[in-house]
Amino acid sequence: MSLHISSHISTPVLKTQALNSVPTCSNFIFNAFPAKPISIFTNLSLKTCAISSTPNGTVVNSVKVVKPEVEVQSDNKLIILNEKLMKLGIDSGHCNPGEYYGMLCPKCKGGDTGEQTLSLFITKDGDAALWTCFRAECGWKGSTQTLPNKSSNGKMYKIAKPKEIRQLTEQRLDLQPLCSEIRAYFSERMISEETLQRNLVMQKTYGDQIAIAFTYRRNGKLISCKYRDVNKKFWQESNTEKILYGVDDIRGASEIIIVEGEMDKLAMEEAGFRNCVSVPDGAPPSVSKNSLPSKEEDLKYQYLWNCREYLEKASRIILATDGDQPGQALAEELARRLGRERCWKVKWPKKDENSHFKDANEVLMFRGPEVLRGAIENAEVYPIKGLFSFADFFDEINAYYYQTLSYQLGVSTGWKALDQYYNVSTICILQVALICLIKSGS
């Protein structure tokens, strides 16, 4: 469209071509307040257009727009930012603005393995820094700004872990077939040679130590690898895609089993269940009190999103996580994401009068494959708030009926001979219980 400008004097109408583009602000993590808008006509001289706004056609020189000085120079801002980060234990002296850096977390020190799990990002303008520790048992995160009173005109985005997905092969990782010592270790845990071979369990030598290598594959291709040494220390290959262990075994399955560790996945196979996968990162210490995050923000459970096409087809998902508190927290987090209505929960058999077995491999070792199979086959519907079964009330109703609760012995019927067989409380309690069941089911 052309721009029409007319004078009150009878002069020809001047047509100026429309501007092709308008300057835009760059996109930043922090949306700072923009500077004073610059007119799109700044570079158009009135003389060029032959238009006069003064008597006798005196030409007014074009106005030069002076950019406001930057409050704090870039170098100074970075110095201030680095000093603030250093007080928190984060050494950012080697970090450039606009880039991600992986480093040792000052809070958890990378756990037993000393893995660099802290991701730091400094904004391009050097005004702020954000960090997150992606170690499951830590999760420390935060941000700081150069100026404490600097405004953020909009949403502050959460830092995303930078990933350059590595392409792995057995040769690049220097993986080797299992030695006799490792095979003997698996044999003690009731894991057969056939199961080890089918799941392509290997080993890796580091220094004078040997670690078990659980190979994570999808469509037969090596995606990631998790290691376990004799001291039960775990670590994984960095910058790899998070997926479920054994995901190819649940392709197209309508019923699947999810366990907490690779050893439990192998134990399930010994009990006859190949339709089983293991989570890669173990269990959280407790259930999160926050609402479910979006796919992009759900970093700890990214493996569920990456294996979504496998999980969507399952109509029944058996959660066979560990029986301890973290294991139960993991079951709850999985159920929240997968849908409680299609989840079932395993209750591990008793070890003695005071305790239960912890996981699938423990049951296999001490009770055998038959008992493990029975625990899976007897899985119960995952608890849903407001939904009950009659069995939930059976013990209480039974106690009322047999009058084992001293405070509910009932009221006499008036016939002493009948009181030993019947009293008013029995029928009343049963009626109330049945009414409650009917209401809860409606």
Image (cartoon, rainbow, N blue to C red):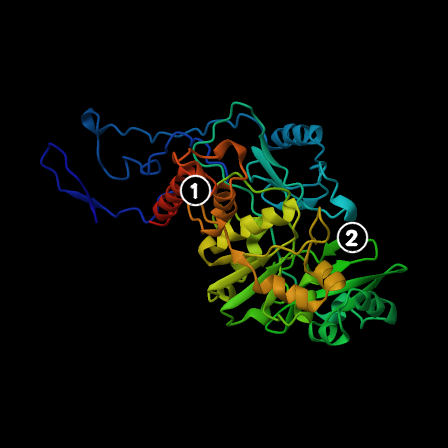
Q: Residue 132 in the image: state x and y as whole percent.
A: 62, 41
When the figure is inspected, residue 222 is found, relative to residue 126, above or below; the finding is: below
Q: Nearer the viewer, mark 1 or mark 2?
A: 1
Image coordinates of residue 143 in percent, x first then y, are 58, 33
At horizontal 81% and vertical 69% (from top left) the residue drawn is 187
Visible in this render: residue 308? no
Question: From what the image shows, is residue 160 above or below residue 51?
Answer: below
Asked if 45 appears above or below 249 in the picture, the reply is above
Question: Residue 300 vs residue 235: left or right?
Answer: left
- 112 to the left or right of 77: right
Amino acid type, mark 1: Tyr
- Residue 233 has which mark? 2
Q: Earlier in the sequence, mark 1 or mark 2?
A: 2
Q: Is 176 located above or below residue 148 in the figure?
A: below
Q: What crowding class fits label 1: few (fewer than 14 Cα within 10 Å), some (14-19), or many (20 or more)?
A: some
> Dot 1: what SS?
loop
User: Residue 189, which numbered label?
Assistant: none
Q: Which residue is mark 1?
A: 422
Residue type pointed to by label 2: Lys
Which residue is located at x 52 percent, y 38 percent?
Answer: 289
Q: Position of residue 108 (x, y in %)?
A: 72, 39
Q: Judge left or right: residue 58 versus residue 144.
A: left
Rendered image quadrant of residue 52: top left
In front: 277, or 357?
357
